[in-house]
Amino acid sequence: MSANRAAESLLALSQHEELVDLPEDYPLSASEDEGDSDGERKHQKLLETISSLGGKNRRKLAERSEASLKVSEFNVSSEGSGEKLVLADLLEPVKTSSSLATVKKQLNRVKSKKTVELPLNKEEVERARTPLEQEIFNLLHKNKQPVTDPLLTPVEKASLRAMSLEEAKMRRAELQRARALQSYYEARARREKKIKSKKYHRVMKKAKAKEALKEFEQLQKINPTAALEELEKIEKARMLERMSLKHQNSGKWAKSKAIMAKYDREARQAMQEQLAKNKELTQKLQVASESEEEEGGTEVEELLVPDAMHEAQMNADGPNPWMLRSCTSDAQEAEIQEDPEQLPEPLAHNVSESEGDERLVAEEEILLKEFEEKRSLRKRSELNQDAESVGSQETKDSISREVLFELRTLSQKLKENHQSRKQKASSVGTVPQVQREVPAPEEEEEALLLQRPERVQTLEELEELEKEGCLQNKELPRPVLEGHRLKKNPNNQTDSPKKKKKEQMIDLQNLLTTKSPSVKSLAVPTTIEELEGEAERDQKQMIKEAFAGDDVIRDFLKEKREAVEASKPQDVDLTLPGWGEWGGVGLRPSAKKRRRFLIKAPEGPPRKDKNLPNVIINEKRNIYAAAHQVRVLPYPFTHHRQFERTIQTPIGSTWNTQRAFQKLTTPKIVTKAGHIIKPIKAENVGYRSSSRSDLSVLQRNPKRLSAHHKKQLKKNSID
Amino acid sequence: MERAPKPGRDVPPKKDKLQAKRKVEAFLGGKGSFVCLRFLAEETAPTTARASPGPPRNKKRNQELRPQRPKTAHILKKSRISKKPQVPKKLRKRKNPEPQRSLSGAQDPFPGPAPVPVEVVQKFCRIDKSKKLPHSKSKTRNRLEVAEAEEKETSVKAARSELLLAEEPGFLEGEDGEDTAKILQADIVEAVDIASAAKHFDLNLRQFGPYRLNYSRTGRHLAFGGRRGHVAALDWVTKRLMCEINVMETVRDIRFLHSEALLAVAQNRWLHIYDNQGIELHCIRRCDRVTRLEFLPFHFLLATASETGFLTYLDVSVGKIVAALNARAGRLDVMTWNPYNAVIHLGHSNGTVSLWSPAMKEPLAKILCHRGGVRAVAVDSTGTYMATSGLDHQLKIFDLRGTFQPLSARTLPQGAGHLAFSQRGLLVAGMGDVVNIWAGQGQTGPPSLEQPYLTHRLSGPVHGLQFCPFEDVLGVGHSGGITSMLVPGAAEPNFDGLESNPYRSRKQRQEWEVKALLEKVPAELICLDPRALAEVDVISLEQEKKERIERLGYDPEAKTPFQPKPKQKGRSSTASLVKRKRKVMDEDHRDKVRQSLEQQQHKQKKAKPSRARPSALDRFVH
């Protein structure tokens, strides 16, 4: 058996160049029951190889689901271990002998012969073999169209890069519009779905039936074969109806109605309707009304309106004739058309997704395809024209493509949201194998789409792009995996806040590792003087090693986080367990109740060290110092800042010149020694005076005295 | 009244200006280049500038002093220059339009009061006008105006008295890009006068291990302790030995207390206090295994950091332990204090520096400075900058004014083990057996770490560093003894004769001691921002207000709603009353709307600052 396979692979090696690395992704069935059905197996394998040539089965993983029952000496298999079976290893004897030298030589010759590797070189791709291809290549070359990977001509690229602000704005506006449209669609669909009126639904149904009829007629005119298919479908529906007991008035509901039918006109009518329906359905060659399943389909459509855009998006590949063809043909064809680069590991970026999801998506795709096709039909003609006048409309197309891409990502998200709901609808029957494969080309296509050079609009983006490029160089050396990076793109918005969060940390890192030019000082400590240059590096290394263990920064950040948490005002929880609900061991008051009785603490003022990553400032109040502070505002002041301003100038002798100090501290009233101070009388305060006021009382501030007072004082002093 | 002399005011007579300024030219050998080396020996003659800014008295409002000090000498020059051309307008206005004639008929060529430059006056203004005031009533406004007038008056007076700060700081200047770091101590000594040259000396004390040293606050006395028990104190200017003992125990640190008469020594077990005769006065057993000592002169607090991880504050005036704080960071052996706010800075092995006050059990702030442990911390005299060096061989300078961000950093070949700031902001770092000194570009900025100002190699690894106050001298304690280096421009040239007078007699010292004790600042007032003490305690204010409202049942300060007065002749009908009320209400409402509109406009203005007016041609652009 092994020899057999070896021969086979050799054959493949010599004959089909494309199959060189077949063993790698060759879908080997893991559980092999050998021997009896050898011929059958061979046949199977042949079929598989052929199909893999077509590119359908390529993505089957060569994995082994269960242990092989028999381990025979003939059965040397390379599966499971992931290693290649090298022919030389098999042929080589245990001990090398000179007699095999000739064979070896031959083998070496075979080996040295250049084989085609699967990410084909440019020239190999470009080499046209058939006359048709040649013609096409000629055409492409004439029009300066890219033949392979880049997908965009240099001119296109340049134009893409050189997108001005206005264009960007336009594009954004378009995007916004599309998004708004989508949301409208969604809202409408939801609204319509919610409508409970039976009559409305009846009317709708009828309208739909009419439309379907119309469409069918049109289809008959345009595409007789499709119409035939439709007819067949109707026929099948009729058969089903005849087989089932639906609409025969034999169900529970019908029976209950039958009782009422005698008295209730409506019931009678309903029964009549049922029967009429049955008749209608079982009648030959009548247009079938939309069945329940179809309804489900429409619902899905409504939900996924933007997916129409997805369809259109395929069309939008317009400028490239290759892509155009792929759009007109169905998905499988597109797959064959796909870049050979993508072939070897198409599943690389799919691995993360669960298979179930994929299947669901696939089913949706199938359901949606019908609807999309209609639209695409309409658009195709236009786009064909577009494709002809590529040069002029390049930029426009690119814009629309961008819009569509955005829409598509959006719709993808939406799909995921609705998947659970659709699961019921789509799990009607087992999906055939081929249909399951649908997502694969889809994914590839997406990858391709994503591979398109992105427009760099702002500086930040540019930086990000650079960064990404760096990352790629490090992490993703193989171009095949580019999908990874590109997959991130839709999530860019979500990424940014994370980055912001991390910024603090980064900032701190920078803070501590500020590199400063270490200028050599004149006098270097004697111990250091000898070791310089590389020794210094050594030292740095040593320091690094020494501090490798304790992450100072992390510890500090943790400490800070704790401090911040501790300083936050605490919420007051006033819930009493057992009040208004069951209480007991292991029972917690409900969240609603807790929410109701939780008194949220008011948000305190922002911390002083909010923007200082390397500092923890204690926010606690120093009550001892506060005891020395003023806590009552004196009379004329209404705001504490006013008062603070008046006490900001120091009056002590330490801060003032002697004269200033004395002036600042003079009492309001200075009494002269040796004078008798009489008690104040009414006249002194400002009433008409007859008696003399005392000289011993001097006003500190003569300016402030009224003229009258001054006069009085003068008078007094005179006498 | 104005003359009223104070007893402590007398200061020793001014020395004659022998050493004042000297321009020395010297040959520097080596490359045969002629180098003009000017060294202005800093002069220590006392001045009577009592009222002028001097070193801080850490009173309640000691922060007020802050802006003055570093600038003094620098500004002094300015004031001299600006005398002629710069006459502030306001002052000029005050002058009489026509010159007064004296009795003799001679005309005063410079009539009126001498002009004062605005910048100098500005320096002494302490009212913070950056904060906006709410609208105030006329009475309040009057008070504010009075306060402002007082401030202006006093600041003008202070600015005028700057004239009395006669001394200028010294400096070292290389000619034609000559690197000052290449100038050796010997060159400097050769260039300066004899008195200054005598300040450079070496004490060879190889026997008792690496030395820690401390200058007294006046800068006149020096105490040093060798690890192997050698403790000595001397008047280092005259080289008169006060005491010399061996404590027969490991000495970890040594520090003068408030005056040179008392000496705290951190020994192996306990903390001991000696007087200047070498007599042991106290053995403080509550402070054990002390590694570092720091004295806060205005609070009379001796802060000790111990191996057990405790930071203990000892009030030396009453002998009580004020606070013992557990730093929870292992062994503490890096400590310094901030002269601006008397906060203690501790360096830890996890790369952080924590700031402590005796009033709080937790650190006031924690700053992550280095990846490795912190080896040394120093804070400059204005409390603006903090220099740290860590095990990661980095030397960093942090801004302490709220942000705590590193301003500059530098990797040193071998990390600095000791750091110290001088009074005028020079930074010295001891690395192995070498000391490097960096100077700032301007007067106020932090020292730039690009080029060292001076370097010096010692006979052993550095163990203690301190700049001498009021002298251009750096004391270095190392394993080979003590070295006193000359560092031109390190110290403040003008000192406050009443605050810290290097020439004071014993009597004066006693006098000062009493005064200082009377002005002692309570320990609990130590906080990060001492200015906060001059602010109203808003929280308790609000609290009290709320309580009052609760007690009274209404808000007494609330604006009373408008009540129309009753009128006669049927004009007081209900409708007209309502109308009148309505009017007032509408007016209020309009005011509110107007205000909010104004605010909005203000915001918008802020949002887009002064966009050029669109021209008529702009319409064609789009």
Image: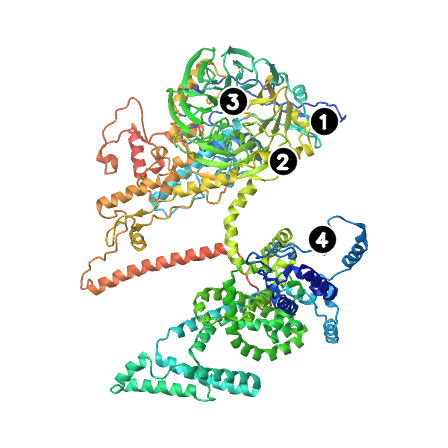
- Indicate which label's residue lies in the foreground, 4 or 3: 4
Query: Which residue position is annotated with label 1?
Result: B35
Query: Is tag 1's residue or tag 3's residue first in the polypeptide sequence?
Result: 1
The correct choice, above or below, for B380 with respect to A72 in the image is above
- Give the answer, above or below, for where B477 lies relative to B384: above
| A401 sits to left or right of A580 | right
Quick one: B156 or B67, which is closer to the camera? B67
Question: What is the x, y in percent for residue B53?
Answer: 48, 28
Q: Which is more foreground, mark 4 or mark 2?
A: 4
Q: Which residue has dot 4 on it?
A: A89
Chain containing the residue with disc 1: B
Picture coordinates of residue A283 (x, y %)?
43, 89
Can residue B608 be seen in this snapshot? no
Q: Amino acid at mark 3?
A: Thr
For label 2, the crowd category at 10 Å Cα-Cα, with few meaning under 14, some 14 to 19 and many 20 or more, is few
- Within-10-Å neighbours for mark 3: few <14, some 14–19, many 20+: many
* Numbered tag placed on residue A541 in the rendering: 2
Q: Chain ID for label 4? A: A
Separation of residues labelled 4 and 2 (CA atoms): 47 Å
Q: Quadrant of residue B153?
A: top left
Q: The residue under label 1 is which amino acid type?
A: Val
In the rendered image, which residue does mark 3 sit on? B47
